Image (cartoon, rainbow, N blue to C red):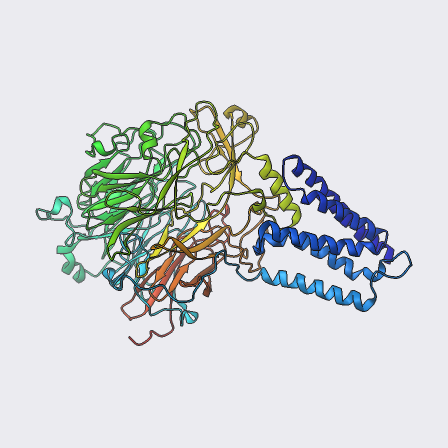
């Protein structure tokens, strides 16, 4: 029996070693590391010697473990997750050899180790393995906070302008996602519990996703569902007050892509729109056709008659409409547009139907609602215009139209019947607004298709991946700043700009705009002029592109970035030494000269940062009292290569806007693309795959960076791990920062909402969610004096199934509000 056990163990180790060596040969021929070849041969020799019951197997196994550990520290330093796959396999082999060492014989016939020595060595190695395993269950910050002292307060009254409410998608129109409340703080957040739960009834299934951040005005909370149903709730109890269903149509574009990230609010008495500045016209009676439930009693309606629809909730739909509701009753404001709706396809031409739709919260400022739209990416040329339009919130009349093909020259709306020039960069996120300057700021994408640049118009290149400043009342452009010169990788800028007044050493302040990008670059710009405040450098990038492709010789890089370091072979990762080797081989096989390495038809090109981010639409937050920028990011590399459309059809690739094949009809090439993962379905590059980072804007220095999320609920090939290992997973949505020293977040792939210490990044509390979340939390103080934190959870991002989906709105509060 002993011979059978040792023989079997030896054969397994030898075969694994030969496999490692064979892969190592391949890696060496590609110019990669020699370690895997050498280690594989030594591992195979160890297995052979175990098979032969030779004592030397123990000493070779121990030497292999020692050398692999030294090599690992030499290659990656003390990075825990980088060390694990490099040493664990050899540690296990050494442990196995130690356990069987009394059965391994010297030439003299004596065992390699006596029983006590073998036991002692086995315990030491087992303790080392246990320590590694235990280390997997605790977070390993990428950057550890140097101090537990909170950042100094530089704006003591920050956040107070919004009172007890959350009046806009990013709380302020400047998108800071900051509240001045400190009732919930680092010392008592551990006591946080669910205050109420509400279910909307619109499940996130069949392509629907909950990415909404509610708003709260006075004593009412407002939110929308993926089907654009608008709901009003009591913010202290979660009781429904009314709902309105615009009954959106399914189109070719939205049938598998429904989102509503937020609604906007306006009080026309406080901010008269252009049509009301000479006094509002008499309003029609909208009580007969409200589309709402639980409308107020007749006596209450009579008392409100004079003010019906003066306070409006405004939002857009995934079938390209914008509509207005009375904030008190949910009644459709029939004086707005055509019976309450404005058709946003007007002026966009025949290609817009089914391709142009809206998903993000609109900006309402100075009586104008600003509208941009999402276009289907990567299917074909000739997509509709990316024109950004401003409508009168009172009447729905079009006031201005900023069109990239005209740029700063003209923002006058076209006359009826004319079509805005197609194939221009679009804006599909949420804009920001500075009331002191009267400027609205919005980010743009690029001309679709995303991966072929040979057909780009000069004005598309001029405005691709840009942030644009316009006068909110007229739409006239004041300035624009490009975050990429020519974009060939879908790096459209989608995060809401964050506005902040940055203190300078001389005591003055500079009004800045912080633009987060999918590239992981953090551009800090003077929002008056568009000039960089944090240095921006034009760096050379690879230009060996396909014939007729247009690429830029340089690209802009900010002095502040997150997760944008150039990948090297040693950054390749895997759960074991074997899939790590696979990833290193695949990396060496790809084209990769750094970011913006052009695609080719000959071999795959690595795309990093990936086209999901960096920073996506969820944006970031800023502790406006201290000037600490807090951002979550995604770190997922992709690969892509050009393929002829007819070849793609022959091999059965299915074109889509978001999938693994982009047809790009009208261009010479389609694009096959995918995530860069190992056969185990695990990313091929080092963790974390998502993090939370705090940056001191006054110095540009990163205060801390921690992994966000665990593998607990993230299925790999249909298997849910169920273990709480904080590897740091791709994130979605954005953070909320409070003056209580906390950062709240729930856009992880596991089912938790968390509170981090804003000073150190340490997790202070987490609450289990029924399903995953994707939006950003919000906070307010209710009429009961309690501070609430609210999250919306409909399921983790893009699972591809209808499993583990929901429709939950969950409010958290302390059991008892502390005395004020």
**Front position in the image: 89 or 352:** 89
From the viewer's perspective, tell me whether residue 396 is left or right of residue 596: left
From the viewer's perspective, tell me whether residue 148 is left or right of residue 278: right
Residue 191 occupies which quadrant of the picture?
bottom left
Residue lying farthest to the front in this orientation: 506
**Front position in the image: 438 or 205:** 438
Residue 146, visible in the rendered structure: yes
**Front position in the image: 106 or 209:** 106
User: Residue drawn 42% across and 46% down?
Assistant: 520
Residue 252 location (% of width, % of height): 40, 35
User: Residue drawn 23% across and 34% down?
Assistant: 408
From the viewer's perspective, tell me whether residue 553 is left or right of residue 397: right
Residue 720, visible in the rendered structure: no
Residue 697 location (% of width, % of height): 35, 54
Residue 5 location (% of width, % of height): 83, 56
Residue lying farthest to the left in this orientation: 278
Instruction: Name the image quarter holding the C terminus.
Output: bottom left
Residue 365 location (% of width, % of height): 21, 48
From the viewer's perspective, tell me whether residue 273 is left or right of residue 354: left
Residue lying farthest to the right in this orientation: 108
**Front position in the image: 404 or 23:** 23
Establish if 225 lies above or below 818. Answer: above
Establish if 70 lies above or below 157. Answer: above
| Count of numbered circles on the image | 0
Instruction: Name the image quarter holding the N terminus.
Output: bottom right
């Amino acid at each position: 029996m002993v011979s059978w056990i040792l023989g079997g163990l030896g054969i397994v180790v030898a075969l694994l070693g030969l496999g490692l060596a064979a892969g190592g040969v391949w890696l060496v021929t590609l110019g990669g590391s020699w370690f895997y070849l050498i280690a594989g041969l030594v591992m195979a020799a160890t297995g052979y010697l175990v098979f032969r019951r030779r004592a030397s197997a123990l000493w070779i196994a121990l030497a292999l473990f020692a050398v692999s550990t030294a090599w690992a520290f030499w290659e990656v330093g003390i990075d825990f997750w980088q060390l694990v796959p490099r040493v664990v396999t050899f540690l296990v082999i050494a442990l196995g050899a130690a356990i069987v060492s009394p059965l391994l014989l010297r030439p003299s016939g004596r065992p390699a180790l006596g029983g006590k020595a073998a036991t002692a060595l086995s315990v030491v190695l087992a303790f080392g393995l246990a320590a590694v395993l235990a280390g997997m269950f605790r977070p390993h910050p990428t950057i550890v906070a140097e101090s537990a002292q909170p950042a100094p307060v530089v704006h003591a009254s920050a956040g107070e302008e919004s009172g007890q409410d959350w009046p806009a998608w990013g709380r302020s129109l400047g998108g800071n996602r900051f509240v001045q409340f400190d009732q919930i703080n680092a010392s008592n957040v551990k006591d946080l519990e669910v205050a109420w739960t509400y279910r909307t009834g619109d499940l996130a299934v069949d392509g629907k996703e909950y990415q909404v951040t509610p708003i709260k005005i006075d004593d009412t909370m407002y939110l929308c569902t993926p089907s654009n149903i608008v709901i009003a709730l009591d913010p202290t109890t979660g009781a429904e007050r009314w709902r309105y269903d615009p009954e959106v149509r399914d189109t070719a574009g939205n049938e598998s892509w429904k989102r509503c990230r937020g609604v906007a609010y306006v009080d026309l008495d406080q901010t008269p729109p252009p049509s009301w500045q000479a006094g509002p016209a008499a309003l029609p009676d909208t009580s007969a056709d409200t589309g709402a439930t639980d409308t107020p009693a007749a006596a209450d309606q009579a008392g409100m008659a004079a003010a019906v629809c003066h306070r409006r909730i405004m939002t857009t739909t995934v079938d390209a409409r914008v509509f207005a509701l009375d904030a008190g009753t949910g009644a459709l404001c029939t004086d707005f547009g055509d019976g309450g709706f404005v058709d946003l396809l007007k002026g966009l031409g025949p290609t817009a139907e089914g391709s142009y739709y809206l998903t993000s919260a609109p900006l309402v400022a100075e009586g104008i609602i600003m509208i941009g739209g999402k276009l289907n990416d990567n299917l074909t040329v000739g997509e509709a215009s990316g024109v950004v339009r401003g409508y009168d919130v009172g009447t729905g009349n079009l006031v201005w139209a900023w069109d990239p093909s005209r740029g700063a020259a003209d923002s006058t709306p076209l006359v009826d019947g004319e079509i805005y020039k197609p194939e221009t960069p679009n804006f599909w996120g949420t804009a920001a607004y500075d009331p002191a300057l009267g400027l609205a700021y919005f980010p743009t994408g690029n001309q679709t298709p995303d991966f072929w640049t040979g057909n780009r118009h000069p004005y598309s290149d001029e405005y691709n991946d840009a942030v644009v400043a316009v006068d909110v009342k007229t739409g006239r452009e004041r300035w624009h700043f490009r975050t990429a010169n020519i974009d060939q990788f879908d790096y459209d800028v989608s995060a809401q700009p964050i506005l902040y007044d940055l203190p300078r050493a001389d005591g003055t302040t500079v009004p800045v705009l912080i633009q987060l990008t999918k590239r992981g670059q953090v551009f800090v710009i003077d929002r008056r002029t568009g000039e960089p405040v944090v240095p921006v450098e034009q760096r050379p990038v690879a230009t060996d592109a396909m014939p007729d492709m247009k690429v830029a010789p340089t690209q802009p890089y900010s002095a502040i970035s997150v997760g944008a370091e150039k990948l090297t072979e040693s950054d390749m990762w895997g759960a074991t030494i074997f899939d790590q080797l696979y990833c290193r081989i695949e990396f060496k096989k790809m084209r990769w000269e750094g970011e913006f390495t052009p695609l080719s038809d000959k071999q795959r090109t690595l795309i990093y940062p990936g086209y999901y981010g960096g920073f996506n639409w969820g944006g970031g937050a800023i502790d406006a009292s201290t000037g600490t920028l807090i951002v979550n990011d995604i770190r997922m590399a992709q690969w892509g290569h050009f393929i002829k459309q007819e070849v793609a059809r022959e091999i059965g690739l299915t074109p889509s806007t978001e999938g693994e094949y982009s047809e790009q009809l009208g261009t010479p090439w389609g694009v096959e693309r995918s995530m860069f993962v190992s056969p185990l379905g695990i990313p091929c590059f080092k963790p974390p795959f998502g993090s939370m980072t705090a940056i001191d804007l006054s110095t540009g220095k990163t205060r801390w960076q921690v992994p966000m999320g665990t593998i607990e609920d993230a299925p790999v090939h249909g298997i849910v791990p169920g273990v709480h290992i904080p590897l740091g997973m791709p994130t979605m949505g954005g953070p909320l920062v409070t003056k209580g020293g906390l950062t709240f977040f729930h856009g992880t792939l596991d089912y938790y909402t968390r509170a981090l210490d804003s000073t150190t990044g340490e997790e202070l509390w987490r609450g289990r969610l029924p399903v995953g979340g994707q939006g950003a939390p919000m906070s307010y103080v209710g009429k009961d004096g309690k501070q609430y934190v609210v999250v919306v959870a409909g399921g983790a991002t893009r699972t591809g199934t209808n499993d583990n989906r929901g429709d939950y709105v969950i409010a958290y509060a302390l059991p008892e509000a502390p005395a004020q």
